[in-house]
Image (cartoon, rainbow, N blue to C red):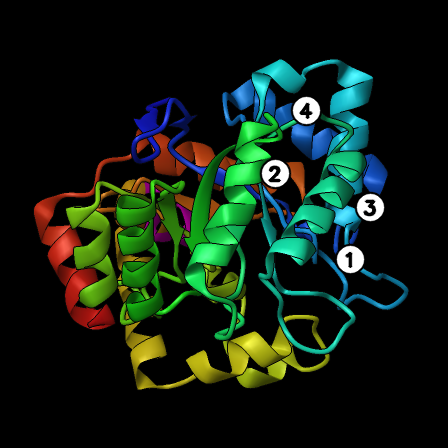
Amino acid sequence: MNYKTLGNTELKAPSIIFGGNVFGWTVNEKDSFKLLDQLLDMGINMIDTADSYSHWAPGNKGGESETIIGKWMKERGNRDKMIIATKVGSNPGKDGRDISKDYILKAAEDSLRRLQTDHIDLYFTHWDDDKTPVKETLEAYQTLIDQGKVRYIGSSNISAERLEASLEASRNKNLPKYEVSQPEYSLMERNKFEGKLQEICHENNMGVTSYFSLASGFLTGKYSTEEDIEGRDREKFLQEYFNEKGKEVLQALKDVSSHHNISQAAVALRWIMQRPGITAPIASATKPEHLKSFQAAIRTELSSEEMDVLNKVSS
């Protein structure tokens, strides 16, 4: 297992970070515990979650994922072995996003309670509300860091302009700096990271952890037609991928995966791992056998020719 430092932090991210959005949604508590046990046995000790996961599921209100992770760590007594990243700002079940100081301070306490821990290793601004001054948001994180409740901070779904303003405020006002960016990034979506955001991350030595790394499961190859996704939980995310580019990407993945005798998911993850500026992809799974793709991605090296093919069909 290769580990990379997340920006200017002491945190070492494994080759793949597990996405905890499935806990309490498509995976119940008992099966979540099994997945978490197997992940740790594999050496994957970083879990990415959020206070809003998974408010969209029937009967949920948000916080279910954090609650399951907290119960698991408490029962196993392994908090010191884990790197826990969670997020704030999506304001689940309420009107509008919120990254005001008062909201962040309260939300952090709620997350700590659910996680049954005294600190969050990496705390992300999940969504920008486009109205709170960046200085106010960073001051909230400063308070949490001073209290020992948060170690480092990151940004997700923030425009390049607001991220630059935040980094400038960090420098000029002696406030905490976003050390990690979490953009959407995959073979089906490159524009949200490549370009200005990638330049900012490079110039400011920020770690980068990509989400939707498997394009909501599209890149696994298990959905051949739009009919395959009808009525599924991820239908709204998958619909946009059934186009000519999607067909070309899936064919390229199929060719490369056949050559290495590994899954298409493993190739899609490995492509991200070998892309410049990426610290580690975030990926989810719902069954222990799905983790074989993680293991294959970690041990496989794609050739420059294979990377060129994947780069071309995904551009």
Q: Give the range drawn in magenta.
A: 261-268
Whole-angstrom CA distance, mark 3 to mark 4, is: 14 Å
Q: How crowded is mark 3: few (under 14 residues within 10 Å), some or many (20 or more)?
A: some
What label does residue 62 carry, if any?
1
Q: Residues within 10 Å of mark 4 (few under 14, many from 20)?
A: some
Q: Nearer the viewer, mark 2 or mark 1?
A: 1
Q: Which residue is drawn at 77% across and 44% down?
A: 110
Which of the 4 image quarters holds residue 99? bottom right
Q: Is most of the magenta stretch helix, strand or loop?
A: helix
- 87 in the magenta segment: no
Q: Name the amino acid type tagged 2.
A: Glu
Q: Is mark 4 on a helix, strand or loop?
A: helix
Residues 176 and 258: in front is 176
Q: Which of marks 1 and 4 is nearer the N terminus?
A: 4
Q: Most extreme residue toward the right, as rendered?
A: 59
Q: Which of marks 2 and 4 is in front?
A: 4
Q: Which residue is drawn at 60% across and 46% down?
A: 285
What label does residue 37 carry, if any?
4
Q: Earlier in the sequence, mark 3 or mark 2?
A: 3
Q: Mark 2 points at which residue?
A: 289
Position of residue 171 in the picture relative to residue 101 (left or right):
left
Whole-angstrom CA distance, mark 3 to mark 2, is: 16 Å
The N terminus, quarter of image = top left
Residue 298 drawn at (x, y percent) = 36, 32
Whole-angstrom CA distance, mark 1 to mark 4, is: 23 Å
